[in-house]
Image: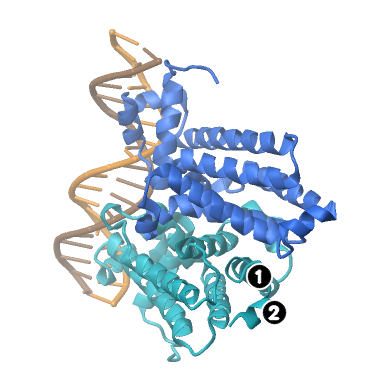
Chain colours: A cyan, B blue, C brown, D orange
Amino acid sequence: MVAHAERGTRERILEVAETSLGEHGYHGTRLHQIAQQVGIQKASLFHYFSSKEHLYRAVIEEGFGETEQVIRRVLDSEATPLEKLRALIDAYVDMVAAHPERTKILLRQSLGDAPAAQNQPPELQRLMKLVSTFITEGERVQVFASVDPTALVLSVIGMVAFFFTSAPVIAPDWFDGGPAEARIERIKRHTFMVVQRCLVGTRDPSSREAER
Amino acid sequence: MVAHAERGTRERILEVAETSLGEHGYHGTRLHQIAQQVGIQKASLFHYFSSKEHLYRAVIEEGFGETEQVIRRVLDSEATPLEKLRALIDAYVDMVAAHPERTKILLRQSLGDAPAAQNQPPELQRLMKLVSTFITEGERVQVFASVDPTALVLSVIGMVAFFFTSAPVIAPDWFDGGPAEARIERIKRHTFMVVQRCLVGTRDPSSREAER
DNA sequence: GTCTATATAGGGATAGAC
DNA sequence: GTCTATCCCTATATAGAC
C-alpha cells in the first residue's frame, strides 16, 4: 500500500528468511546464510529476533496473514458463488505463483517441519474453515452440487501447491515450457476445470438455469 | 511375499530411517535417534551405510522401487482403460495410506529436501512419464476426454499425498473422523470422482456405452 | 558386526566493545 | 544497531578394541 523504496533491515531479514525456509526447510536453514544474504553479521539477527524459532514464527505469520486477507477479500465481495469460486482460484494461484517459497513453507509446515511444539498452526485451520464454509453455503443454497467440501478444498490446495513447488522438479518439461504467464493461465484453467466439474458437475449449465 | 519373521539389521535400519526421514526431513533426522530406535549404537550404522546421505539414497530407492512395481503391475494388466484408472487410484491410495512416511519423503524430496547435488530424482520423473503416457494413450483411442495428462497426474499425486500427509494437521476433524478403512474409502471415492469427471467428463456413462 | 571413545566441524546463541 | 570474539552443544563421522 505504501511505497517502500527504503525497507528496514527487519523486513529484509524476513524476506530472505522466507526464501531460505522455503528452499531448505527449518532445519536446513542456516542463520549464517540469511545474515550473509542480508549483508549483516549473524549476531545482528538476534537484535531483531530472539531466536531462530521466533524468526520462523514471524515469517509464518506474515505469510498466512497476507493469504488470509486475499481470501477474505474475495469471499466478502459482491459476486455469485460461481464467480467467487473462480476469483478464489485465480487469487490463490496468483499468490502461489508470486510466492512459491511461501507455499513451500506452508507445505513443509503441514508436513511437520516445525520445531517441535508448534505443530498445530491455527492460521491454517482457520483458512480451511473459511473456504469450506463458503462451499457448504453454496451447497445449501443449491448452487453447488453436493460434495465433501473439506476434501475439495484440500484437493485444490494440494494440487495447486504441488504444481508450483514439485512440478519443476518432477515434471520440468511440463513446467518450464513457455513463459510464466502462460503457465499460470494453464494452471488456473486446469484447476477451475477440475473444481467446476466437481461442483457444477454432470448436469449441464443450461438445464440448471431452468431449475431455479 | 516371503515370511520374514527375522529381518536383518539393515532392513530394520531402513525401516526406522524411512519413518524418521518422513517425519522430520533429511536435515531434521538424527542418526543418533535412528540407532536408538533400532537398538544399536550410532557408530554401528556406519557399518551398513557409509554416510547419512547414502542411507537417504537407499531409503528413497527402496520406496520408489516398490511404488513403481505397483504402478507397472496395474498398467500391464488386462483391463479397460477406465478399470485401470480405478485400479491405479486404488493402488496409489492404498500405498500412501500404508506408507504415509514414504509419501512424506516423496513430497519433501520434491520440495528440495535433498543434500545438495541429487535434487533431480530420476525415479520420480520416470514414474510420471509412465502414468501420463497411459492417459495420453487413452486419449488417442478416444476413451478419455482430451485433457492435459501431466496436469492431471500431478493433480492426483498432489491431492492424495496432501490428504494423507497434511490433512491430519490442517483438517484434523475431517481426517480423524471414523476408522481408517472408512477414511481410505472416502478418499478413493473422492479422487476417482474427480478424475472421472475430468476424463470421462460431461458426457454421461450411458451414452458412452452406446458409443463403442 | 558391534561396541566405546574421540576427532572434527558447524550451528545457535551470548558478551561486550563501539 | 552492528560488529568481533567466543561459548557451548550437538551432529556426523572415524579409530580401534573386542
The secondary structure type at the circle numbered 2 is helix
Residue marked by disc 1: A203
Q: Which chain carries label 2?
A: A
Task: Give amino acid for label 2.
Answer: Ser
Tell me where residue B18 sits by quadrant.
top left
Q: How far apart are marks 2 and 1 (CA)?
A: 8 Å
**Image position, residue A44 (x, y; %):** 30, 68
The secondary structure type at the circle numbered 1 is loop
Q: Is residue B31 shown left or right of residue B188?
A: left
Q: Which chain carries label 1?
A: A
Image quadrant where one finds the N terminus of chain A:
bottom left
State the residue in front, B86 or D9.
B86
Label 1, residues with CA under 10 Å away: few <14, some 14-19, many ≥20: some
Tell me where residue B30 sits by quadrant.
top left
**Image position, residue B99 (x, y; %):** 47, 39
Task: Tell me if residue A57 comes above or below residue A80 in the rendering.
Answer: above
Asked if residue A157 shows in the view, the reply is: yes
Which residue appears at 46% of the width and 24% of the height?
B11
State the residue in front, B122 or B200.
B200
Task: Give amino acid for label 1.
Answer: Arg
Residue marked by disc 2: A206
Which residue appears at 69% of the width and 56% of the height?
B150
State the residue in front, A111 or A55.
A111
